[in-house]
């Protein structure tokens, strides 16, 4: 696996991006006005409420994503070897065992939908 | 210095520096991003060991899912006030020194015990990667089948637990 | 990367050329988008600057160069500046793993008094054995760019936009990963070059030991005929991955100003758009590689083209280069078709609301992708036992 190529390309792109940013910053005018540096809030002065609550749904989405992603990762080695298993005659066993796994997956998904854990995100 | 050795040293330095950054920087967002960089470095180190599938899975799951969760959750909270928290005092200082000593002893002992098995590690390089993934798949369904199914149940338990935790604690949940 | 200096240089140059190709495709795509959207909306689009308005993005780039550089004072400097530079990395690294054409074989030749041995150059950035797993892993790193941009801007609209965009991206990564399982089941490998090699020739099924060949000889053995549902789910999920309409709520102007790139102007904004078009190219390239035969031309086999090329040119190196170029043109045409579909869908469908978007990802696409996996597994089991 060409790890050297990947690292070379990543470093090259980072340098290229930095160069483009530098070029962009050199070309413009500079008129100092403190209003320009305030965060954009449709024209009114920014109201920085200290207690802006952000929903806990983001955390739930990320956690459930990790869980289902790991289950999908487990399907990848099965998918590569399934044809070999079928051709060697053990297809039914592997199929049933994977279907049990998928059934647990479906049960988890069904429970998560039913318990309204991800409503109105 | 062969190209493989140079590659290893670059990756090792990047990973270790990112890991040290995680511990030393006080801003939690930088810490989490440095941990993500360390995960990417570990994935690259897996590639140098010819474990390509595990490297890809490390990227997808650790660097792409778990660390995204960390960074997202850290952005949910406004942690500028906690940056100044740092325990002082004699007892906590002694506990910190004791923990560092135990960790150092563990690391030195592990290196000493496993250095004898480094000679046999070269046998892993003879496997090509596609065969390794297929072998992993075959093993998963023959020898480790029970563990595989138990893992599905374990993931289900984790999902149920997280949803239950997030609802009962209240936290920043808006009730409607 | 290569054994001697010539090979290493050519490989590095190839990577740089692929990256620059992606960056240079953006002006053409933006022109296509603005003219195309104009015609879809029954107006003309930009047609003043240059012939047919083709110089429009050159003028835009010059304008971006002269914009004022500002930095919101509540922002975080390092993340604010690192995010646009890092926006190009995931798309390019993923695009380099997609095979663009057949490998080029160069015979041994004499140059500078030294004989350089026979080489084989792959017509792609690098060849990765676990191709799909690598591409999925690199695409999932795109969430960091968005989060860095949102946090680094220091305004709560940017942060909300970034969190919603990254939640949308990770939800659709599930459907993406699961729709690919059907493709892997069929071809039995992660390697993209292997998959394209298995899609050569006319359509033929293996059923209970018999090979059923299609009577229509020009119908190619493409993946779309085996996995139609998987292709639809994959294509829809990639729309969400690259934040394109109808899933572009993170950039929706009326909702969150401009989402996570509110506080960016000038060249930094341009870099984000190059990253978005880069993701679009990766998505189109993957669609072509999985479901539409990659670089293959329907009805014409590789041997026919290479024998025609070696009959037409003098040396075998030139014949090999010529064959690869022909197949690259075929790949490029298919890629262009898919990118046009991306643009067409953008200007045709209305935008989804955020809760509709998340419901679609979790409650519709994920179960359908699971159904696709189960059906594919059953079909392979019945057909090959």
Image: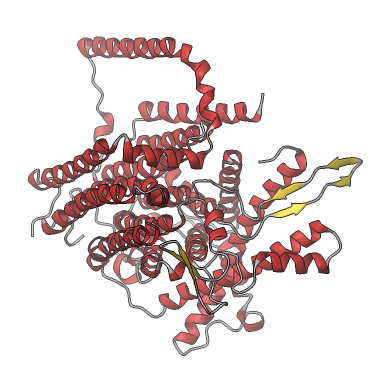
Image point 59% across, 84% down: which residue? Answer: C47
Q: In the image as oriented, which residue stretches furthest toward the bottom?
A: C42
Q: How many marks?
A: 0
For residue C353, side relative to residue C107 (left or right): left
Is residue C123 among what the camera can see? Answer: yes
Measured as percent of width and height from the top left, residue C66 is found at 58, 63
Measured as percent of width and height from the top left, residue C353 is found at 26, 70
Q: Is residue A88 above or below residue C270?
A: above
Q: Is residue A37 above or below residue B57?
A: below
For residue B61, side relative to residue A33 (left or right): left
Viewer-side residue, C324 vs C61 = C324
Viewer-side residue, C67 vs A52 = A52
Q: Is residue C203 above or below residue A107?
A: below
Q: What quarter of the picture does the N terminus of chain B occupy?
A: top right
Measured as percent of width and height from the top left, residue C272 is found at 48, 59
Q: What quarter of the picture does the C terminus of chain B occupy?
A: bottom left
Q: Is residue C246 above or below residue B12?
A: below
Image point 66% across, 26% down: which residue? Answer: B2
Is residue A39 among what the camera can see? Answer: no
Q: In the image as oriented, which residue stretches furthest toward the front?
A: C209
Residue B175's quadrant in the figure?
A: bottom left
Image point 52% across, 78% down: which residue? Answer: C215
Measured as percent of width and height from the top left, residue C13 is found at 70, 50
Image point 32% across, 38% down: which residue? Answer: B142
Coloration mode: secondary structure
Viewer-side residue, C296 vs C20 = C296
């Amino acid at each position: 696996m060409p790890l050297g190529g990947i690292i070379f390309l990543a470093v090259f792109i980072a340098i290229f991006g930095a160069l483009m940013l530098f070029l962009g910053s050199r070309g413009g005018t500079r008129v100092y006005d403190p209003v320009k540096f305030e965060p954009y809030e449709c024209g009114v002065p920014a109201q920085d409420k200290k207690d802006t609550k952000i929903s806990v749904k983001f955390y739930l989405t990320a956690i459930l994503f990790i869980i289902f992603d790991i289950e999908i990762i487990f399907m990848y080695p099965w998918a590569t070897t399934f044809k070999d298993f079928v051709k060697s005659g053990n297809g039914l066993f592997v199929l049933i065992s994977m279907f049990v796994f998928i059934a647990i997956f479906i049960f988890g998904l069904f429970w998560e939908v039913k318990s309204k854990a991800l409503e109105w995100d | 210095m062969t190209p493989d050795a140079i590659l290893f040293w670059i990756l090792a330095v990047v990973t270790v520096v990112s890991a040290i950054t995680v511990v030393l920087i006080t801003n939690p967002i930088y810490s989490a991003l440095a941990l993500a960089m360390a995960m990417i470095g570990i994935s690259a180190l897996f590639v140098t060991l010819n474990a390509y599938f595990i490297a890809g899975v490390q990227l997808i799951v650790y660097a792409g899912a778990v660390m995204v969760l960390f960074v997202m959750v850290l952005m949910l909270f406004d942690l500028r006030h906690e940056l100044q928290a740092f325990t002082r005092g004699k007892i906590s200082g002694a506990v910190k020194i004791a923990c560092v000593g135990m960790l150092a002893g563990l690391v030195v002992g592990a290196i000493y015990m496993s250095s004898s098995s480094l000679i046999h590690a070269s046998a892993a390089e003879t496997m090509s990667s596609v065969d390794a993934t297929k072998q992993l798949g075959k093993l998963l369904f023959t020898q480790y089948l029970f563990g595989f199914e138990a893992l599905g149940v374990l993931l289900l338990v984790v999902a149920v637990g997280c949803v239950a935790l997030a609802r009962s604690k209240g936290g920043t949940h808006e009730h409607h | 990367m290569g054994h001697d200096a010539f090979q290493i240089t050519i490989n590095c140059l190839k990577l740089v050329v692929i990256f620059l190709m992606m960056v240079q495709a953006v002006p053409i795509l933006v022109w296509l988008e603005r003219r195309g959207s104009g015609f879809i909306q029954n107006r003309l689009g930009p047609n003043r600057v240059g012939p047919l308005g083709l110089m429009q993005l050159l003028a835009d780039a010059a304008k971006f160069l002269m914009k004022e550089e500002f930095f919101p004072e509540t922002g975080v400097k390092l993340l604010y500046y690192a995010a646009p530079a890092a926006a190009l990395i995931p798309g390019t690294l993923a695009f380099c793993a997609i095979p663009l054409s057949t490998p080029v074989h160069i015979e041994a030749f004499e140059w500078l008094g030294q004989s350089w041995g026979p080489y084989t150059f792959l017509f792609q950035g690098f060849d990765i054995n676990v191709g799909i797993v690598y591409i999925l892993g690199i695409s999932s790193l795109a969430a960091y760019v968005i989060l860095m941009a949102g946090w680094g801007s220091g305004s709560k609209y940017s942060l909300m936009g970034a969190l919603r965009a990254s939640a949308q991206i990770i939800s659709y990564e599930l459907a993406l990963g699961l729709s690919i399982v059907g493709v892997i089941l069929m071809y039995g490998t992660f390697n993209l070059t292997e998959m394209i090699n298995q899609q050569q020739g006319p359509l033929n099924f293996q059923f209970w030991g018999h090979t059923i060949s299609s009577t229509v000889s020009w119908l190619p053995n493409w993946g779309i005929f085996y996995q139609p549902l998987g292709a639809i789910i994959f294509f829809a999920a990639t729309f969400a991955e690259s934040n394109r309409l109808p899933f572009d709520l993170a950039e929706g102007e009326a909702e969150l100003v401009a989402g996570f790139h509110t506080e960016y102007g000038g060249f930094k904004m341009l870099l984000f758009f190059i990253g978005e078009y880069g993701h679009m190219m990766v998505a189109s390239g993957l669609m072509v590689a999985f479901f539409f035969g990659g670089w293959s031309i329907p009805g014409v086999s590789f041997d026919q083209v290479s024998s025609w090329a070696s009959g037409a040119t003098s040396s075998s190196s030139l014949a090999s280069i010529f064959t690869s170029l022909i197949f690259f043109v075929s790949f490029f045409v298919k890629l262009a078709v898919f990118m046009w579909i991306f643009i067409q869908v953008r200007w045709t469908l209305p935008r989804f609301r955020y809760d509709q978007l998340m419901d679609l990802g979790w409650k519709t696409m994920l179960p359908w992708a699971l159904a696709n996996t189960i059906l594919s597994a059953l079909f392979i089991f019945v057909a090959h036992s």
